[in-house]
Amino acid sequence: MPIDTTDLWPEPDPAPRAAGTVARAEATQTVENEGFVPFDAPPPPMSAPAASPGHAAPDAASLRDATHQRIAVVLEELALEVEDLGGRLCTDMDVAARHMDVLQAIDLIAQKQRSLARLLEADCPITAIEQIGLDVLRDRMRMFH
């Protein structure tokens, strides 16, 4: 039986990437066109909280909320990347047939990431916990309330 030498994870294009806004535009276009963010994509631009004269700096709760929002975005991006990886593996029917349990585990990772992202974004964590579709994860999160 011949050995399959198909490269499932090709190396990134060795051409140097443009810096700054061009690279960000490329990453944004990838997200819009293909539905995932590549590992080497530059982070989105950070928008600092607007501080106007006479107003105090953001409080700890605002900074925590902003941090949770950013974590939720990264979790969603990771879920898309994990799903893409699983999808690529599923295109090889031999791999899919031999490793269905592993492919299902990959899908479960993406589901957990999405659930955690929604939990971080929720106005009411208790309600968000009850809306988690994965029993095991929902039960783990219930332990905190």
Image: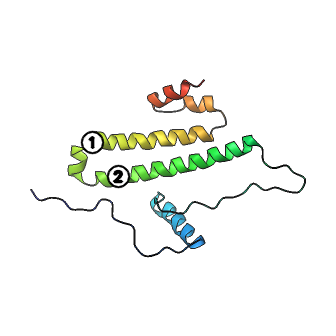
Height in image: 57 above or below 128?
A: below
Say which quadrant the N terminus sits in.
bottom left
Q: Which residue matches tag 2?
A: 87
Circles 1, 2 touching at the beta carbon (< 8 Å): no
Residue 121 point in image, percent of width and height: 62, 42
Residue 64 point in image, percent of width and height: 68, 42
Q: Residue shown at 30%/59% (left/top)?
A: 8
Residue 101 point in image, percent of width and height: 29, 39
Q: Residue shown at 49%/25% (left/top)?
A: 139
Say which quadrant the C terminus sits in.
top right
Q: Which residue matches tag 1?
A: 100
Q: Residues within 10 Å of mark 1 (few under 14, many from 20)?
A: few
User: Amino acid type of disc 1?
Assistant: Met
Residue 34 point in image, percent of width and height: 45, 61
User: Amino acid type of disc 2?
Assistant: Gly
Under circle 1, the secondary element is helix
Height in image: 131 above or below 43?
A: above
Q: Nearer the viewer, residue 33 or 22?
A: 22
Height in image: 3 above or below 136?
A: below
Under circle 2, the secondary element is helix
Total number of numbered labels? 2
Q: Residue shown at 33%/64% (left/top)?
A: 10
